[in-house]
Image (cartoon, helix red, strand yellow):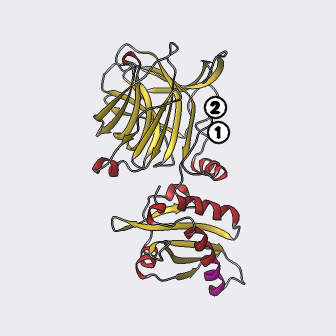
């Protein structure tokens, strides 16, 4: 499925991060066609927001029409939720464990097949936990898509987007989420952007993605994909790790709300987590530090913007060798940092 993104994404790295972060029988846990009919992958976690017990999710096979134009339907593997709880405040969720996304494009085709109570289904963004998340949900009887915020397991805010619903019920939804802005596209047509600011936006800064079904709705999902939109600093780290085989790890930290956090890492799941004190010290003091382990050496050095102001610090770790002295390691790290600084001209480039 062709898409246009704000920034170039390193596909080898995306594939690597998916494989590294998820333990599944398929290389990509969102490629349902790779899974056998039956239970969903262990990469997912079934839970519930609101009343009742988690719903029933499985992989099945059914006839699905083409996304664009005329043509014959073909058999595809689909993710199915079979609803059994008619309670109106029962919200079944299937969350993808692993990466916690901030800026990304999440796309899926889905429809509500049946349900005697409230018929609704959708996709979840930035689930902080089981009760706090963003949601785009389809209500076919109302011919509407709703953007909602769940607060403590309940609807906190909703915005309605009217849609044209095809007779077969399938909706192709693609949402590009960049920082605090959401750009939905429904059946190939762009809807108006949605902006979130303030306390809620800070609380939901990063989280899991997943699938959602309300009440006793029987739903189907297919053609699912997620593409991270990398911050310039993460793109730089990815590039360095791919091209410099002497590196064993590379991390960049900056300060947010007075605390050091990783803004880029060779391990994507570290982004947004707390960084150690030596990185904060390098940022505040503007000094370079060297440490030697049994198998590697690490140089921690400040990261500067285009005006020479310190905006972060990089921890550059090289594979150790007898010839790798402090002077050589610091010299190599300077080259690595200069390449990162070439892509991070201002502090905003450190955050996705």
- State left or right for residue 253 relative to residue 248: left
Instruction: Check if mark 2's residue and mark 1's residue have beta carbons within 8 Å.
Output: yes
For disc 1, the marked residue is 25
Rendered residue at 30%/22% (across/down): 88
Q: Which mark is residue 35?
A: 2
Q: Dot 1 lies on which element?
A: loop
Position above or below: 338 against 99: below
The quarter in which the N terminus is drawn is top right
Q: Residues within 10 Å of mark 2 (few under 14, many from 20)?
A: many
Tally of marks: 2
Q: Dot 2 lies on which element?
A: loop
Q: Position of residue 74 (x, y in %)?
A: 66, 18
Q: Nearer the viewer, residue 337 or 126?
A: 337
Rendered residue at 65%/39% (across/down): 26
Q: Position of residue 50 (x, y in %)?
A: 31, 32
Rendered residue at 65%/78% (across/down): 332
Q: Which mark is residue 198?
A: none
Q: Is residue 291 magenta?
A: no
Label 2, label 1: how many angstroms apart (C-alpha)?
8 Å
Q: Nearer the viewer, residue 33 or 223?
A: 223
Secondary structure, magenta segment, majority class: helix
| Range of magenta residues | 327-332
Q: Residues within 10 Å of mark 1 (few under 14, many from 20)?
A: few
Rendered residue at 36%/22% (across/down): 215
User: Mark 2 vs mark 1: which is more N-terminal?
Assistant: 1
Q: Position of residue 39 (x, y in %)?
A: 56, 29
| Quadrant in which residue 337 is drawn | bottom right
| Quadrant in which residue 333 is drawn | bottom right
Residue 163 visible to the viewer: yes
């Amino acid at each position: 499925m062709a898409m246009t993104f704000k920034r170039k994404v390193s596909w080898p790295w995306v594939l690597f991060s998916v494989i590294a972060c998820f333990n599944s029988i398929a290389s990509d846990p969102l490629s349902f066609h790779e899974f056998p009919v039956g239970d969903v992958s262990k990469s997912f976690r079934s839970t519930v927001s609101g009343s009742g017990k988690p719903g029933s999710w499985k992989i099945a096979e059914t006839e699905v029409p083409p996304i664009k134009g005329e043509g014959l339907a073909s058999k595809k593997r689909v993710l199915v939720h079979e609803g059994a709880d008619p309670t109106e405040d029962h919200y079944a969720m299937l969350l993808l464990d692993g990466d916690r996304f901030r800026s990304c494009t999440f796309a899926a085709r889905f429809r509500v097949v049946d349900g005697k109570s409230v018929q609704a289904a959708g996709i979840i963004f930035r689930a902080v936990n089981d009760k706090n998340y963003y949601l785009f949900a389809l209500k076919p009887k109302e011919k509407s898509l709703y953007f909602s915020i769940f607060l403590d397991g309940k609807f906190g805010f909703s915005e309605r987007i009217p849609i044209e619903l095809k007779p077969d019920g399938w909706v192709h939804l693609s949402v590009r989420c960049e920082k605090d802005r959401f750009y939905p596209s429904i059946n190939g047509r762009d809807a108006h952007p949605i902006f979130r600011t303030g306390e809620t936006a800070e609380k939901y800064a990063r989280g899991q993605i997943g699938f959602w079904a309300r009440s006793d709705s029987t739903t189907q999902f297919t053609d699912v994909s997620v593409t991270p939109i990398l911050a310039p600093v993460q793109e730089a780290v990815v590039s360095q790790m791919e091209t410099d085989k002497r590196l064993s790890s590379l991390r960049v930290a900056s300060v947010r709300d007075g605390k050091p956090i990783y803004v880029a890492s060779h391990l994507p799941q570290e982004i947004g987590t707390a960084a150690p004190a030596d990185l904060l010290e390098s940022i505040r003091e503007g000094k370079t530090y060297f440490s030697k382990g049994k198998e590697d050496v690490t140089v921690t050095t400040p990261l500067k913007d285009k005006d020479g102001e310190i905006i972060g610090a990089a921890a550059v770790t090289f594979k150790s060798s007898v010839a790798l002295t402090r002077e050589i390691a610091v010299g190599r790290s300077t080259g690595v940092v200069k390449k990162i600084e070439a892509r991070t001209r201002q502090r905003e480039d450190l955050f996705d």
